[in-house]
Amino acid sequence: MNLQHGTPESLGIPSGAIVDMLDELYRCGIEMHAFMLLRHGKVCAQGNWAPYNPETPHIMFSFSKSLTSTAIGFAVQEGILSLDDRLIDIFPEQSPENPSENLQKCQVRHVLMMGCGHETEIEWASGGSADWVATFLHHPFVYEPGTHFMYNTAGTNLLSAIITKKTGQKLTEFLKPRLFQPLGMADVHCQAMPDGVEMGGAGMWIKIEDMARFVQFVANQGSWEGRQLLNPEWFHLATSKQIDNSGGWGGDPDWQAGYGFQFWRCAPEGVFRGDGAYGQYGIVMTKQDAVLVIHSASMRLQAVLTSVWEKLLPAMAE
């Protein structure tokens, strides 16, 4: 099904506010690739900057994490696993012979919230070891799980490995009939780790419209075209604050507002996002019933969000 469209004004957004946001992004030196704005489930503005186009999938970095989280949500809903499942019970062969007390306590929920207990991240970006799961589990669990936020892409890769271990399917294979096909998302694929497990923490390829479909699905709390695909309770958990992340990330407010299950809380009330490096955002503004997805390429990550908060958000009547 094609996404419905409407003019900004018909959906309660002054066109000038969208132009002001784009002008501010330009003034900030943000290299834009694509964006799409939806309100009340309808597209009211979109654009692509050459050479990028709507039909070509775009590499996703950590925005992939929100898709991996959603796969865990489906697995929990179907009884394939529980948030309380311990890592050492899922991967007994790769676990240390005498696991530490903190490792013994570590559950799926702690990995989801970036609070597994690691102080540093294992090497994964250069390919790492084919037995990277064992490397992850043997890495020191310094903190009691759930007490210390540490951004951990390897942990999200582990969530993908959990899906594969529990189902025998790769992450995108598992998501295809549950998410991609019902939402009309085509040609979604993900890069693999040395052992064949798809990364999960990065590496997805998605078109801008398919990114918008997914974020709108999240905003809908798991409903799509009248069907409740994933229970709303999952999204209450995934997009609410599960762990404190204050005190880091250079003091930028939108990186200290709390972290859910692979979703970031934002500084404005009622706003959360999926987030990828260089400015890949899937923003849900719950009070305004609006969704904004952005592909960009910039190190000025806070500047992108600040442009949205200052130029677009105040112009939308609740």
Image (spheres, grey):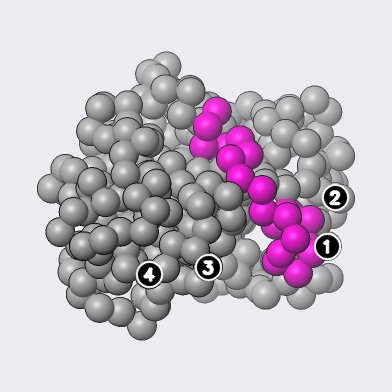
Q: Amino acid at mark 4?
A: His
In the picture, the quarter occupied by the N terminus is: top left
Q: Report helix, strand or loop for mark 4.
A: loop
* Disc sitting over residue 208 in the figure: none
Tell whether label 2 touches label 1 (CB within 8 Å). Answer: yes
The residue that label 3 is drawn on is 119
The mark lying in front, picked from 2 and 3, is 3
Mark closest to the chain's N terminus, 3 or 1: 1
Residue 232, given in percent of the width and then of the height, sits at: 48, 22
Local crowd size for mark 4, using a 10 Å CA cut-off: few (<14), some (14–19), many (≥20): some
Q: Report helix, strand or loop for mark 2.
A: helix
Q: Is residue 242 within the magenta segment?
A: yes
Mark closest to the chain's N terminus, 3 or 4: 3
Query: What is the CA distance from the residue labelled 1 to the residue labelled 2?
Result: 8 Å
Q: Is residue 31 within the magenta segment?
A: no
Query: What is the CA distance from the residue labelled 3 to the residue labelled 4?
Result: 9 Å
The mark lying in front, picked from 4 and 2, is 4
Q: Amino acid at mark 1?
A: Glu
In the picture, the quarter occupied by the C terminus is: top right
Image position of 293 (left or right of 53):
right
The residue that label 1 is drawn on is 24
Residue 154, given in percent of the width and then of the height, sits at: 40, 65
**What residue is at 78 percent from the left and 46 percent from the top?**
267
**What residue is at 77 percent from the left and 51 percent from the top?**
308
Residue 97, located in which quarter of the rendered image?
bottom left
Residue 284, given in percent of the width and then of the height, sits at: 63, 39
Query: What is the CA distance from the residue labelled 4 to the residue labelled 2?
Result: 44 Å
Q: Report helix, strand or loop for mark 1.
A: helix
The mark lying in front, picked from 4 and 1, is 4
In magenta, the rendered stretch is 236-256
Local crowd size for mark 2, using a 10 Å CA cut-off: few (<14), some (14–19), many (≥20): some
The residue that label 2 is drawn on is 311
